[in-house]
């Protein structure tokens, strides 16, 4: 839970960072454009003294701008996946307190968790990050409060497609996060998975949450999709592939062993 809280704070920090970076980047571009205009003017006038100085200024501003975009790209780079057999219901229940604290008291959290849910094969840390991000988005969409529902279900796809996206036929676990918030227009839905797409004020949104969630679902062999209606709410559905192997019992640690007779 502590690691996840740190993650939530990190996402907020990234929001401030990207807002700040965009601002710095613009300042550097202004310097580069101004410097180039000066150079052009001097060349046209045949005044060759100090050309070197202007060139150096432009060069330095351009290198600093490149360093800024590298920092941004480092954030968007995917963490490597470490897929293991995971029980989604248990993972969700384990996050309950963190999610409650994140969404605040004016939003009620409902769980509709399927009995006999299949285990899935995925990186549990990334699934936790995905759920936390979806709940933060839901919270932001319900400033006046509302309902946030997390639902799980076993689903079997016989077809090759889900909506307009390709998916391999087979068994999946559906994890859906639904809110009763402001919803999205079709234009926003169409771009919501794009990296850096955000409608939030500068410094608050990174536009990375949903793109990372989409990447995580795809890399796990599943899919993510959005259903949303303005004024009604949003549902984000993750389909993650069923784990078909055997789940080995965790070896008991000393703390879990019954006390030994003295
Ligand atoms: P961010 O939250 O930083 O903006 P995301 O990639 O998570 O980045 O979301 C992109 C955009 O999709 C948001 O700016 C918002 O416009 C829209 N969005 C995401 N989730 C929701 C939601 N639950 N309700 C309404 N709009 C949403």
Image (cartoon, grey):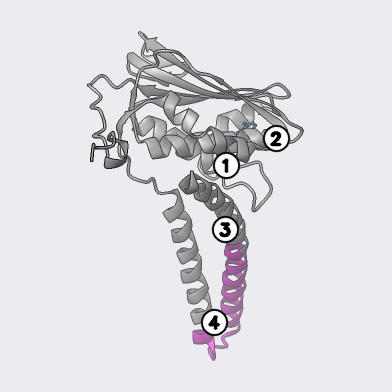
Residue where numbered disc 2 is placed:
105
Q: Residue at x 55, y 81 (%)?
A: 43
Left or right: residue 138 compared with residue 238: right
**For residue 242, side relative to residue 262 (left or right):** right
Which residue is label 1 attached to?
Answer: 197
Distance (Cα) linking label 3 and label 4: 29 Å
Q: Position of residue 199 (x, y in %)?
A: 65, 41
- Mark 3 lies on residue: 17
| Residues marked 3 and 4 touching at CB (< 8 Å) | no
Spatial distance from mark 1 to mark 4, Cα to Cα? 35 Å
Residue that numbered label 4 is attached to = 54
Ligand 1 visible in quadrant: top right
Q: Nearer the viewer, mark 2 or mark 4?
A: 2
Query: Helix, strand or loop at disc 4?
Result: helix
Q: How far apart are the two marked residues, 1 and 3, measured between alpha carbons?
A: 15 Å
Q: Name the N-terminal-most of marks 1 and 2.
A: 2
* Real-space Cα separation, disc 2 to disc 4, in angstroms: 57 Å
């Amino acid at each position: 839970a502590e690691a996840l809280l740190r993650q939530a704070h990190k996402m907020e920090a990234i929001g401030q960072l990207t807002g700040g970076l965009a601002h710095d980047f613009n300042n550097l571009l202004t310097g580069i454009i101004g410097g180039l205009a000066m150079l052009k003017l001097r060349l046209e006038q045949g005044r060759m003294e100090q050309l070197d100085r202007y060139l150096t200024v432009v060069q330095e501003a351009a290198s600093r701008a490149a360093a800024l975009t590298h920092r941004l790209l480092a954030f968007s780079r995917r963490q490597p996946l470490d897929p293991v057999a995971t029980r989604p219901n248990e993972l969700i229940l384990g996050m309950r307190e963190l999610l409650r604290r994140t969404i605040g008291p004016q939003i009620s959290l409902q769980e509709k968790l399927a009995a006999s849910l299949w285990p899935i094969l995925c990186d549990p840390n990334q699934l936790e990050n995905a759920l936390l991000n979806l709940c933060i988005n839901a919270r932001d969409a319900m400033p006046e409060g509302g309902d946030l529902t997390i639902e799980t279900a076993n689903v079997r796809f016989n077809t090759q497609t889900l909506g307009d996206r390709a998916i391999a036929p087979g068994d999946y676990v559906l994890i859906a996060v639904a809110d009763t918030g402001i919803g999205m227009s079709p234009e926003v839905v169409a771009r919501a998975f794009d990296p850096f797409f955000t409608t939030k004020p500068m410094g608050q949104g990174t536009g990375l949450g949903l793109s990372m969630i989409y990447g995580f679902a795809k890399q796990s062999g599943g899919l993510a999709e959005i259903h949303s209606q303005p004024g009604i709410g949003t549902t984000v559905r993750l389909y993650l592939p069923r784990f078909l192997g055997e789940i080995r019992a965790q070896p008991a640690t000393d703390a879990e062993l019954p006390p030994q007779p003295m």
